[in-house]
Amino acid sequence: MGEVAASMARVISGKPEAIRLSLVALLAEGHLLIEDVPGVGKTMLAKSLARSLDCSMNRIQFTPDLLPGDVTGVSVFDQRSSTFEFRAGAIFAHIVLGDEINRASPKTQSALLEAMEEQQVSVDGQTHRLPQPFMVIATQNPVEMEGTYPLPEAQRDRFMLQISLGYPDASAEIAMISTHELSDPLESLTPVTDAATLRTLRLATRSVYTSDSIKKYVVSLVSATRGTPLLRLGASPRASVHLVHAAKAMALLSGRDHVLPDDVQALAVPVLSHRVLLSTEAHLDRRNAPGIIADLVTRVPVA
Amino acid sequence: MTQPPPDDMPSNGWLLVRERARLADTGVAAAATLLALLSLVPLYADLQWVAPAVAAVAVVALLGAGARAIALPVPFVPIIEAMGVIAVLTAVYTSDLAWAKVVPTTESWDALRPLITEGLLDAQAFSAPVPTLPGLVLLAVAGAGLAALCLDTFLASVRSPLLAGLPILVLFAGAAVLQFGQAPWWPFLAASTAWLLVLAADQRERVRAWAGLAGVTRIRGLSTGARRLGSAAIVVALVLGITLPTRPPAAPAGSGDGAGGGSAAEGGPVLLDPLVSMRRNLTLASDTEVLTYRTDAVEPSYFRVSVLEAFDGQTWRQRPGLESGRDPGWELPGVAQAPGGTATSAYDISVSNLQNAFLPLPYPMAALENVAGVEGGWRLDSGTGVAFSGDRAATGARYRVTALRPDVAAGDLRGATLAQGSLWPQLTLPGGMPAVVERTALEVTAGADNPYDRALALQDFFARSGGFEYSTTVRSGAGSDYLAEFLQDRVGYCEQFAGAMAVMARQLGIPSRIVVGFTQGAPVDDGVWSVTVRDAHAWPELWFEGIGWVRFEPTPAGSATVRTPAYAPLSSGGPGLSGDESRGVFDSEGFDAIAAPETTDVRGLVNRATLVVAILAGLLLLGWPMARRIVRRRRRLHARDYPAVVEGAWDEIGATAVDLGQPWSPYGTPRQVAERLSRGMPEPAAAALRRVRVQVEQVRYAAPVADSTTVRTAIMERSGAERAAAVRADVKTVVRELRRRVRWQARVAGYCWPSSERRRQRSSMRSMKPEDLRERGASAGAGVASSGARVPNAE
């Protein structure tokens, strides 16, 4: 995994945390939501991850006129054999990059999200398994922008992690310009691992030990989001499950066979902040979700 | 990764907030008690009780805050506070007997106890507003202290605002009941405000728990619910209370006996209760007029209202039968009608305010005529010379009395012999009279050889030569147990003088009784006299064979209108009267010698023991955190199994860091905490800390040994004891380094007054357990869900 990270870092300069979190999502069998302004490297991150893994990758550019069938695939009538034949949609790949997911109509969005959750696609009564490992990296423009359909809370909940890349600092940006000057850096990437290895690593992630006190800590952290007056909607129990899975992946990435509260703390903001809704009071105080979650982390005693 | 840098960890700030909240609870408890105490204001005639009561509340608050600051176990806090209340009582009432003015000694206890008894008796005897007699003030102070204690305990320790409402309710309701529904409106407002204060404090605390988690620094608009509800309730209650018709207070039935009721201060009905309310009348600030009369007598007689002849050892009572209006009469051998001559005076009496069913009458009386102004018949009891009706009050009565002008000569009285036989009910004394009473009676009258001289000697002893002082600020009562005390303290008022003389006279074989009534009052016009409540009086009448019942006046001139009868003059220092002799014999030292025999040594011993115990208790309190810290240190490092040792080691390092004022937060992960603590630490100590931290992580978070196959095999090879020893050594290294980093003052302070013990209790008391969180989260979540359903429409 260190190699994957190193290979990705060659393309994405100055964002080791984002790379690490995308690997966490990969290992923890979760999906990644990247919310950021255009042009900061969202697509590049997804592509570099897919390239480094030697996995198939599809990119879906979400637009308002994109249909669900474009995502999942359609049954086409074959006149020669007089049968319906399934034409796989763009979602049939190991890594699927859903670009600007909030530009598509809600119907299309939900088609993608269903596939994400079920790991399979049902068209005309036929169920088609998606390739394993399967991971969706969706990018989303901040909802304030024009012409977007913000994802409903229920659907945001399906994403394990939400990260935002942010603008690179000056030196990283200069380095980026240099790498892009001569050739596309993605071209130079060679796969460092394959799907089979990834499946093994995912199994290893599942077997990372989580002590009872860690579980308690996770639960009190998640419960705290439900109790605070600053949040109108707290995190779901699914969030607890995701948080523990992600923490396991983090522990594995750090070479440990058990989860530490530090893993949980490091992941609390990316796992929880996109699942909560701020209360009016918090809006008035000009707080934002990551800030509130980070505050909670410092205020819930470590078990 | 938006993990804040470790410096942002609210290690001390958040705990400080909690500490302040607890302090605020103590403050709220004190404020609520003070507000509730306002209910007592209408109960007392003046405000003398306020200062000591406020002092008691303040002492309770201070001790509560202090005890919690040193993390005393919760059950001990009220004990400490109770000791504070006792200290205040001691300081106020018996400071001269106490050690250092506040620590009670056996003597101060002895002095305090009767005051309490007296206060309780007074509380039964008086009706509001009561005079600020010591016993009653003591009750107020003790009550204030107790209420403050309960509120403080319920609010700051038990954290149950519902229970905290109880003392407020008791104070308010108790006061309201005692005022027979005549309570003014504002104590209700005060008590309600106190209750709201308590509720608001609770609300604030609850919100703060979450606000703290969510990082809210200002709390606004969250207790408005309680505030609105409370305000609405108060407004409704006040409006209802003012507009709804209320039943006027029932006029007190003047049965002449039992607990006094219905007397009010200014212009209220006057009820002359035999003895019990005498002092109240005497100490009243008001000059409510009881009766006026026109007479041709130059020196008018006292006015008798009732006659108390039966003494059961505790109280003087009227003869049974009179109370019910029936008069079976006792078979009195030879009741004489009046002593002395035959000249008469006429009294035209108009009673303006007296609730008793007795008419005030001069004595001795020849005729009672023209009773008008009150309905029903009045009967004259020939044995006692009182006029009574069944249950009608004397208020409004107008009547004419022809009274004999007593012309008794001392010689006649001296010639009178002792009453024959012991069948006289007026000679009966209950058993168990203190020996000192009879001894005193015998010694005072040692030089007298006839009943009259003996009576005179007694009167002189009380009124002049015995050194008695007139004061209405002593406790009331004329029971036998008070008698001995009265004889020793030599302070009292008419009731006690009359009682003492009557008892002594009986012991000397002279039949006696107590008369309750009024002195002649003061002239207001030519031949017109006015008698007010303050002229209420009690005096003894002694029986002289062949002459009759003769009034004596043992009360020293303290009340202005008291007059010694002409036939029983006080000694003027001249010879021939036994007063001088008695004075020589019975000075105060003589009484001390009688009252306090060889028990002094025992008392001294007890006092010394009290002192030692008090000092030990003080030292224990001061040393409590240190002692507990030492015990805990041992227990932490010598736990039985390895994980406990590791956890103990971690706790010990944390406690040491806290004691020495170094960064340590229960909210950080072991890694963060250790990282922060090891900044600037030299390598051996930092490495030791790191090793302990790794062990903590292993123990807490890694898979149990049986499941583990990889990481800890190397460690597993060593025995548990060895590993524990290694951990202990690491702890030692770290602790030594932590101590080295601070100045010696901080080291000493950290050892003697460990703040970790304080913080420990606080966090253990208020920190949220996951179960707790889940519960609250669930209920909060339910609320969110329902409001969340409305969100799409709202936006």
Image (cartoon, rainbow, N blue to C red):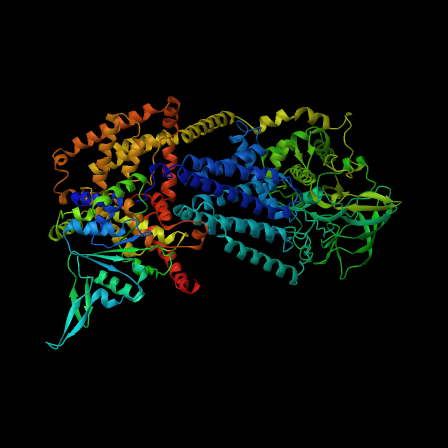
Q: Residue at x 66, y 39 (%)?
A: B496
Q: Can residue B638 be seen by looking at this rendering? A: no
Q: Is residue B100 above or below residue B700?
A: above
In the rendering, at what x and y percent does residue B62 appear? 50, 36
From the top left corner, tell me how far across and down residue B403 is, in percent: 83, 48
Q: Quadrant of residue B575?
A: top right
Residue ID at (70%, 31%): B461
Asked whether B572 or B527 is in front, the reply is B527
Q: Is residue B247 above or below residue B138?
A: below
Please provide percent x and percent y for residue B632: 31, 33
Total count of labels: 0
> Quick one: which residue is furthest to the front in this view?
A182
In the rendered image, residue B486, in percent from the top left (x then y), is placed at: 63, 35
Looking at the rendered image, the quarter that the N terminus of chain B falls into is: top left
Front residue (pair B150, B69): B69
Question: Which part of the image, by quadrant, shows the C terminus of chain B?
Answer: bottom left
User: Residue at position x 51%, y 38% from top?
Assistant: B60
